[in-house]
Image: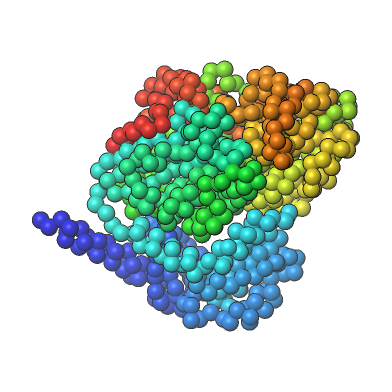
């Protein structure tokens, strides 16, 4: 048999099927014009779009039948002139919605309406949206204006509008590729490219006989001063081992991102610099936070006199190749691999990845970074999955000794330390990852300072620009936060905008000249970022206090200080080396982590349904990955291992 010929016959048959099936089942009254692939979805253009929106279950039923998300749009020739459409839209939406920009994207037949109160643009049961469609034929997409100004969100939205013609072409080509039928999935292999038995440069390659996808593509976190070519020990282990995998960048079909921390995304723009032009999947908050962190990384490296691995144009290229998905949406990333994101409870938009491979052949759950416990910001990680054959689980706090104190005790310990330092005339520095821990600590401070008279502290709380921007992005996606917090943001009582917080504008000297204060500065492990600048200035005064509330990786300056480092030599602004004694008090308050502690990791594994058949640990120092694998294996009587970077595992 001529295999190639047979394949192409199959292809033709299946391709015809999808569109043909759709055409056959679409009701005649909607006036079908055309259907085309658009990334993982199918866009259908019709001349009578009102009829589609009159039948509420139609799109849902059709989508589940062809197992693809359907996007219904007007036949582009039917669209009302944008000027007239804009007038109509403003007439239809109540003033109280506080509409901002209205942008028409003719390539997609969509109009993006930004509003402070999206609910009022949507109307009861979608009634306002329906009227907009009826009267203009444009399909409205509503975007929330963050309650705090966000340059990053504005920048990302503008970039995507500007590049809409490119986006259309890109999505069409991705869609065609996904929909090209393939032969049966025969085998499945996972290769650890980074972040196994270590923290940093997370990356996992999954291969079948047809597809190659990557989950995450990170750097060693906060690589610090002068570029990112080595970690702080000077060892050259900052990037994932992509070169070892015997693939070229363009062999990759898709990249799936779990969340926006540098150790999961930091290397991604580099792939675009060297020719990757496929899709990057992530949640909407992750896309915006990636922009924030990656632009800042480039800026930081330039400022310290280094050469970044990539520059802004590579980050832009990456952003124009992102395809966002919400939690729970099932998405074909290749013809044989279906992705579903679930809440991971780690930072806003963070996701546990569920992959369904080869028509039920194999199912993987990859936790990314995950919190299965109480935080003020997010709900705990999801535990319900359709099927699980292999679980890849993070192990940051996977050792038996990694048991966090009770959360309330942690909060009181933090507040007591702050109060004592301020009362003694000192300043408090809390170095934080700008995304995640910063917002969690802001919520704690806001709760105690505004509700608990015992902690009335007469000192300003300063935030740096990165933390402020990250908080602003949180206010654009309240639906990703805990319900109580969501309500506060939606009713204009956002804790992130509380008057207790002040922005540290301009120079750090201005902040430090003043009296006692609490400084939240980005750069969680003091390996660069504004936290290091503050630390250098504050280190010699024994009245000051440095409080760690998050993870310090092995070898980071933060870890060395925790281990008793007493002096430090750093370059000043002119690059001259200066010597500083570390006299300030150093305190570590555990319990605020966005990672699960040992008990939570075990509880998560016990609670996930259905239980996994195999477990692989990752994202933890060597002994933690090993220890966690051992306990999970014994406890749940399944095969559990701690693979090393470069290990390949045949899963099927
Ligand atoms: Zn993380």
Q: Quadrant of residue 423?
A: top right
- Give the residue at x 79% y 45%: 507
User: As drawn, is 80 to the left or to the right of 355?
Assistant: right
Up the image or down, 501 lies above or below 56; here it is: above
Between 180 and 548, which is closer to the camera in this rendering? Answer: 548
Name the quarter where the N terminus is drawn: bottom left
Query: Where is residue 599 drawn, in percent x and y?
Result: 55, 23
Q: Is residue 106 visible?
A: yes
Between 229 and 261, which is closer to the camera in this rendering? Answer: 229
- Give the residue at x 32% y 38%: 189
* Count of numbered badges drawn on the protein: 0
Q: Is residue 128 visible?
A: no
Query: Where is residue 50 drawn, in percent x and y?
Result: 52, 74
Colouring: rainbow
Query: Where is residue 241 drawn, in percent x and y?
Result: 41, 38
- Give the residue at x 72% y 31%: 578
User: As drawn, is 297 to the left or to the right of 76?
Assistant: right
Name the quarter where the C terminus is drawn: top left
Up the image or down, 594 lies above or below 73; here it is: above
- Give the residue at x 69% y 76%: 91
Residue located farthest toward the left when viewing the structure as drawn: 1
Between 110 and 540, which is closer to the camera in this rendering? Answer: 540
Query: Where is residue 213 drawn, in percent x and y?
Result: 38, 46
User: As drawn, is 68 to the left or to the right of 119?
Assistant: left
């Amino acid at each position: 048999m001529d295999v190639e010929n047979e394949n192409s016959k199959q292809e033709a048959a299946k391709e015809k099927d999808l569109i043909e099936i759709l055409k056959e089942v679409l009701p005649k009254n909607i006036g079908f014009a055309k259907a085309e692939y658009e990334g993982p979805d199918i866009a259908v253009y019709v001349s009578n779009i009102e009829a589609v929106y009159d039948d509420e279950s139609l799109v849902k039923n059709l989508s589940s039948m062809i197992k693809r998300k359907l996007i219904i749009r007007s036949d582009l020739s039917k669209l009302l002139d944008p000027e007239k459409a804009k007038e109509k839209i403003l007439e239809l939406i109540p003033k109280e919605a506080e509409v901002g920009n209205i942008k028409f994207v003719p390539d997609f037949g969509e109009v993006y309406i930004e509003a402070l109160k999206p609910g009022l643009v949507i109307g009861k049961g979608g009634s306002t949206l329906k009227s907009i469609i009826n009267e203009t034929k444009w399909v409205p997409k509503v975007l929330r204006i963050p309650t705090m100004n966000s340059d990053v969100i504005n920048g990302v939205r503008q970039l995507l509008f500007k590049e809409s013609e490119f986006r259309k072409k890109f999505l069409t080509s991705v869609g065609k590729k996904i929909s090209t039928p393939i032969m049966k999935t025969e085998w499945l292999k996972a290769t650890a490219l980074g972040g196994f038995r270590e923290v940093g440069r997370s990356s996992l390659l999954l291969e079948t006989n047809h597809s190659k996808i990557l989950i995450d593509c990170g750097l060693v976190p906060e690589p610090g001063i002068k570029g990112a070519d080595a970690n702080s020990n000077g060892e050259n282990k900052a990037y994932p081992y992509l070169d070892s995998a015997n693939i070229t960048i363009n062999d990759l079909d898709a990249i799936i991102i779990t969340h926006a921390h540098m150790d999961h995304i930091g290397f991604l723009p580099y792939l675009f610099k060297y020719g990757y032009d496929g899709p990057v999947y992530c949640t909407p908050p992750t896309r915006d936070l990636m922009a924030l962190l990656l632009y800042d990384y480039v800026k930081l490296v330039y400022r310290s006199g280094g050469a970044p691995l990539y520059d802004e144009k590579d980050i832009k290229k990456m952003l124009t190749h992102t395809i966002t998905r919400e939690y729970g949406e099932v998405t074909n990333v290749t013809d044989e691999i279906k992705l579903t994101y679930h809440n991971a409870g780690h930072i806003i938009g963070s996701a546990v990845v569920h992959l369904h491979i080869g028509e039920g052949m194999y199912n993987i759950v990859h936790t990314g970074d995950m919190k299965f416990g109480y935080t003020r910001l997010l709900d705990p990680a999801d535990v319900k999955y359709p099927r699980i054959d292999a679980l890849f689980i993070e192990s940051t706090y996977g050792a038996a000794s990694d048991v966090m104190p009770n959360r309330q005790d942690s909060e009181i310990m933090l507040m007591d330390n702050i109060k004592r330092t301020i009362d003694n005339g000192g300043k408090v520095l809390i170095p934080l990852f700008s995304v995640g821990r910063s917002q969690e600590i802001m919520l704690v401070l806001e709760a105690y300072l505004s509700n608990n008279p015992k902690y009335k502290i007469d000192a300003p709380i300063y935030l740096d620009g990165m933390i402020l921007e990250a908080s602003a992005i949180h206010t654009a996606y309240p639906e990703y936060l805990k319900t109580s917090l969501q309500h506060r943001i939606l009713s204009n009582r956002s804790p992130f905008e509380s008057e207790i917080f002040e922005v540290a504008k301009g120079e750090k000297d201005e902040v430090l000249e003043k009296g006692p204060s609490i400084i939240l500065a980005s750069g969680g492990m003091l390996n660069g970022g504004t936290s290091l600048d503050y630390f250098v200035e504050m280190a010699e005064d024994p009245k000051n206090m440095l409080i760690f509330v998050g993870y310090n990786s092995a070898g980071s300056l933060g870890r060395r200080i925790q281990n008793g480092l007493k002096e430090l030599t750093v370059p000043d602004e002119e690059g001259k080396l200066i010597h500083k004694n570390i006299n300030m008090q150093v305190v570590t308050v555990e319990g605020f982590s966005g990672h699960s502690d040992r008990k939570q990791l075990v509880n998560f594994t016990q609670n996930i349904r259905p239980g996994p058949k195999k477990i692989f640990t990752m994202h933890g120092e060597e002994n933690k990955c090993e220890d966690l694998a051992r306990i999970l294996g014994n406890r749940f009587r399944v095969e559990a291992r701690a693979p090393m970077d470069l290990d390949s595992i045949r899963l099927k």
